[in-house]
Amino acid sequence: MAKTKVAILGGGLSGLVTALGLTAPEQNDQYDITIYQLGWRLGGKCATGRNPDFHQRIQEHGLHVFMGQYDNAFAMVQALYAEAARPPFPDWRKAYTQVPAMSLMEEVDGTWIPWVIEAPVFPGTPGIDPPPSIFKRMFQFLGWIMKQLEGPHAEHFAGPADGAAPWWRRALHWLLALIGRGVEHAAIALLRDAMALVDRLDPDPVTHTKAQHNALADLLHELRVVINRTIGHLVAGNTELRRLWIVIDLGVSSLIGGLRDGLLLDPAANIDAVNRRDYKQWLMAHGADAMTANSALVRALYDLIFAYPEGDWQGSGDCEAGTMFLSLMNTATYQGSIIWKFNTATGDLVIEPLYQVLKARGVKFEWFSRIDELTPSPAGDAITSVTIGRQVELANGAYDPLYPLASGQLVWPDRPLYDQIKGGAALKASGADLESKWTTWPDALPPRVLQAGADYDLLVLAIPPGAHRDICAGLIAQKSAWQGYIAAVQTVATQSLQTWTTVDEKDMGWDHPAMVGGFDASNLNSWADISEVLATEEWPHAMGVKGEQIFCGPLPCPPYPPPKSDTAYPQQAQAMADQSIHEFIDGKAADFWPARFGKGGPKAGTLAATYSRVNIDPGERYTLSVTGSSQARLRTDGSGYVNLYLTGDWIQNGQNLGSFEATTVSGMLASRAISGFPNTIIRLDAARFSIVRKAAGTLPRYVDYAGQVTFPGEIELGQTRMWAFLLKGDQAKMAAWCEAMFDTPSHSAVQVLPLSSYLMMSVVDIGVGRFADAPQMGWSRERELTFWIPVVRVADQDGMKVASKFYMAMPYLVLDNPVAIASGREIFGYMKQAGRIACPGDPGNPSNLAVDLFATKTFGPDSEEQYQRLLDLTPTGGSHPLDEAVRGFEGGAKALWSRLTGDAQTWYPSLKLGEDLLGDVLGRRIPQLFLKQFRDVADGTRACYQAITEAPGHVARFDSIPQLAEYDMVLHALDSSPIAAQLGIAPQQRVRGAEFVYDMTIAPGTVLWQA
């Protein structure tokens, strides 16, 4: 069987991890992989180079560490060191130094002083042991608060009654005693209830309810109020108390927000709403003190992820609240130390063994290959070609990118190995930077054009978003999803400085943990001592090098990299960085090293060497998580092109912050989407972010032909008028329909239950319908009758059904537009039938609604299929005002939800139908659920294709008529479509209907299960 040819565009970490997954032994050698890489080395932002002119010193892009919660990154490194022929260290543990503390810089009365944060060393090893529950860590944090109140700060607080009691009982007893008569009886009763809740709360949040989380949030709020009441007036003049209050306030306020906003119950359903706020704003919205939100502790979090659009490091910064919160919750579940420093160069520790293993597995590497353009097909369904600039011609047709140190360790050079390049001497003499967008060095060879089918079956785009406006211009022009992503996702340039000193940290005057953040007197706001790597460099003993440090921070920059023609930009950016470095070394460094630095710079002989760089190239800029941007990120399988997958820390990966872990996970997701491997990813619901397609990589291309009526991409419905009615049905009959449509074919892989005994009927008049990706087809009108069953997907848990997601399922749809019928059935799985629909305002019809269905009225061999009357809705003239609270989309959705769930508790008391399940709808996304199937040509009783799919309808404009109108409804009996009998609807009844006007987009969906 021929191998599937996969071209990976970009050799950064995520592209390499994708290749690692596709070449795993479990894949049975079914992929032929080529990685195309700009310049001479792999790694992207993780790339490093050794400088032979300066004693093989390491030159980094920036400060890199692993955090103790990077389970997937650790697991990858552990596996690489076991497989690589020549790993940098014989044992992966030797590659790291664990760091259990850090220092934050605080300006107090005009002086910068360190604030040491000591983090416990927890049991367990990341990548090997299962991560702990966040609720276990939450309880440990609250226990730490109790210890602070009983121990070093006890003089400010009332003491507990029973020192032998569990910490949380002592806390609650103390809290109740301290509140005393200042709180009404009802509040005290609430706290007593909360005490009982904490006593029985399971560490696994799957078992929790929204009510429990709200009760716990109420408890934490009271705790915060009382602590603030006790010490709030003292913090201004007491640094120790102020820092205690900031830590407590930050932790408690974050937990309150996470509990109340559903982020600890169902983050997937709630994170988009939370991400509309910046993290600092969100903290204060949940009661945090402004002093806390603007503290060194929070600033350091923003510094860590360069959260300053356009490098405005003196601004307030911008980071999504939900993304930051979930990142902090993940961080809280670290194992071992919170920080694991590297004992050699980043590229040598991680990227070099990756290269070794991939090369041994048969992966091919095309060096000096610049990706210039991805060209989509005119139909917008596939990438037909990729244009690649060939920067050099190799002397022997191949390139070996590594060279050995004196120790034998293989490393990456900081420059091309010129002796392997034709004309290498001229290239060296020119000083040209082949990794720069703005290089003036001409390509040595004509461009190479990869063709779909001949050179690749599948593409993986592993190049960061800073380059996409250039190389993906055709995709952006074709796809609205790409346009939204490009508009929302931002990147920022960064800078770094490395120093080599002849004096160690202590003798320079720094006697604190040398992992430092929050120094916002400079854009070099974070730094670390990395003297551990000196053992792998080759400094002569006579030079006396004893210390090595690395600094980094954001660099002021335009929102997008300037055009290639602006060849002066790199020099201008480096000059700006050099100015900030000069200001730091000649002044601000004294805040850290007063014994060796002062105004005017260091004492003579202190600095042995320095290295600075600006990370301004499209692939080097850091991807930000600005407010509201995560929702626009693309999934690994969400490019909109059948042969293009995406990977990098810029895609939807469950973390959406730039890090080693997010990048590793993104590569795993790409591999999983293509091949199904790996099936599971630590800490991630992998199925949410990558759907494994049947025979992935070998799906045939859809054959486009003249006269076709279906097209890929979004479907836009504008100027839409709806009449909506809530009908009473038979819950048991609707449950039987759900079981037949979803549970039975999927063998219970997808279990669905009707939410209540109510369903919705709507008549819709669509003014303008169009295929977003086929503008040449113009637009058309459409009318439809739909019966909607509100349903929930459920899972079995401890003998009970537990709801996981809300959907709308549609057993019957009647349409008058043949194109909409064909596309709906073929693409999504809508059960659409042909009909004719009359709406108020039609000629001769001032007010009635009527629907005819092409159907068989009475089964029998002599019956003719023809248009039969299905529905009559005749207005009575009666009306009722629509409450103001439910006229808007969100208010109406909540009111309907309350009605449905109130009824549902009669049928499913264990489902825990909290409003958190409504997260998609409150975000104006209507999740729809389908059974998509096609009959087999040989055996029509069988399905040649059968899948359960979902697709969202995104509601834009929404207006309602402020009244409910009464109608007399007659739902006629038709044997071929027995709607009333099948769903248990009274066929003749008086109903009330609301009228709405809206615009909607039906987006491409995902496969939940496939036979």
Image (cartoon, rainbow, N blue to C red):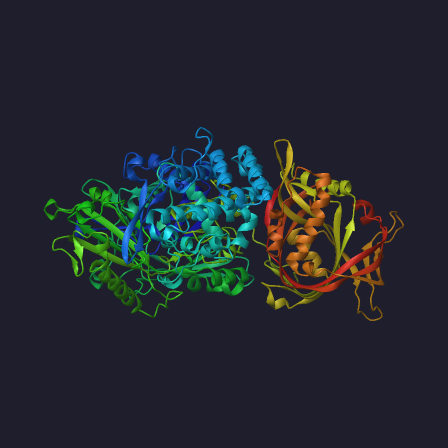
Residue 745 visible somewhere in the drawing: yes
In this orientation, which residue lies closer to the viewer: 667 or 908? 908
636 vs 621, left or right, is right
Whether residue 5 is visible to the viewer of this picture, yes or no, is no
- Residue situated furthest front in the rendering: 181
Q: Position of residue 479 (x, y in %)?
A: 54, 62
Residue found at the far left of this picture: 542
In this rendered view, identify the residue nearer to me: 603 or 977: 603
Would you identify the image quadrant in which residue 961 lies?
bottom right
**Residue 984, image quadrant:** top right
Q: Position of residue 218 (x, y in %)?
A: 54, 45
Residue 342 picture location, percent across and down: 29, 43
Please give left or right for residue 295 compared with residue 266 in the image: left
Q: Quadrant of residue 144?
A: top left
The picture places residue 886, in percent across and down from the top left corner, at: 69, 58
Residue 722 drawn above or below residue 755: below
